[in-house]
């Protein structure tokens, strides 16, 4: 059902395919912000502060508490990561997201296809090395997010790396 609000028709519910282009555009814009900081800052300062800033950003995103599960629950968080309940960078990947490995202490989640961050950097004409580097920096947001949940996040590979057509996120209990 739709209703008119200030001259626009607003639907009560939207299909993911209707809003996905908006997520993609927003994530590509986020990629450009990071890339422009990279372009204007001295590399050593960017390397140091961008990682810290992204880690803090990930912690901040967790404050929204989209994830309602228990801290430290590896399996439940992995299930949350592959659900359609969240709109995040993974939702912009072309392929499916699924668990590659599931355990009580460690889960590995694969996000098939390129994410909009990588596409955004490529659209800017950045070199493959620059795209891979910026992706590495952006991953610190995921590390901050999992840190707040008493988990450790890491990547086996990302779609920014040569020869890898997916991102593989490892979720582990903190030791």
Image (cartoon, rainbow, N blue to C red):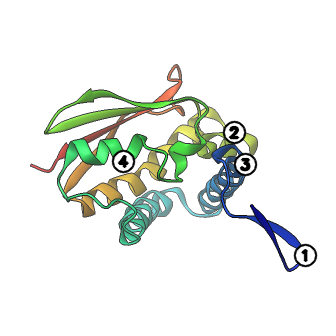
How far across and how far down the image is residue 122, in percent?
69, 39
Q: Which of marks 2 and 4 is nearer the N terminus?
A: 4
Q: Are marks 3 and 2 in contact (CB under 8 Å)?
A: no
User: Which residue is disc 2 drawn over?
Assistant: 122
Q: Are marks 3 and 4 in contact (CB under 8 Å)?
A: no
Name which residue lies at 36% across and 67% down.
Answer: 65
How far across and how far down the image is residue 101, in percent?
26, 27
Q: Do the residues labelled 1 and 3 touch (CB within 8 Å)?
A: no
- Cα separation, mark 1 vs mark 3, equals 20 Å
How far across and how far down the image is residue 130, in percent?
59, 41
Query: Most extreme residue toward the right, as rendered?
Result: 7
Q: Are marks 2 and 1 in contact (CB under 8 Å)?
A: no
How far across and how far down the image is residue 67, in percent?
35, 59
Q: How crowded is mark 2: few (under 14 residues within 10 Å), some or many (20 or more)?
A: some
Q: What element carries label 2?
A: helix
Q: In this view, does 23 lie to the left or right of 87?
A: right
Q: Are marks 1 and 4 in contact (CB under 8 Å)?
A: no
Name which residue lies at 25% across and 35% down.
Answer: 107
Q: Which of 141 and 47 is in front in this view?
A: 141
User: Which residue is disc 1 drawn over?
Assistant: 7
- Cα separation, mark 3 vs mark 2, equals 24 Å
Which quarter shows the N terminus? bottom right
Q: Earlier in the sequence, mark 3 or mark 4?
A: 3
Q: Earlier in the sequence, mark 2 or mark 1?
A: 1
In the rendering, which numbered label is found on residue 80?
Answer: 4
Residue 131 occupies quadrant:
top right
- Cα separation, mark 1 vs mark 4, equals 37 Å
User: Which residue is disc 3 drawn over?
Assistant: 18
Query: Most extreme residue toward the top, as rendered?
Result: 163
């Amino acid at each position: 059902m739709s209703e008119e609000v200030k001259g626009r028709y607003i639907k009560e519910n939207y299909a993911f395919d209707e809003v996905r282009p908006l997520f993609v555009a927003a994530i590509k814009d986020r990629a450009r912000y990071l890339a422009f900081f990279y372009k204007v800052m001295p590399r050593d300062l960017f390397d140091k502060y961008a990682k810290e800033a992204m880690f803090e950003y990930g912690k901040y995103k967790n404050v929204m508490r989209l994830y309602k599960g228990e801290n430290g629950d590896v399996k439940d968080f992995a299930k949350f990561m592959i659900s359609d309940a969240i709109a995040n960078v993974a939702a912009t990947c072309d392929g499916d997201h699924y668990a590659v490995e599931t355990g009580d202490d460690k889960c590995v989640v694969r996000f098939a296809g390129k994410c909009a961050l990588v596409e955004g950097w490529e659209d800017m004409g950045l070199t493959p090395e620059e795209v891979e580097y910026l992706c590495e920096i952006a991953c610190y947001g995921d590390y901050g997010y999992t840190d707040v949940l008493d988990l450790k996040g890491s990547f086996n590979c990302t779609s920014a790396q040569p020869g890898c057509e997916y991102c593989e996120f490892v979720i582990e209990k903190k030791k």
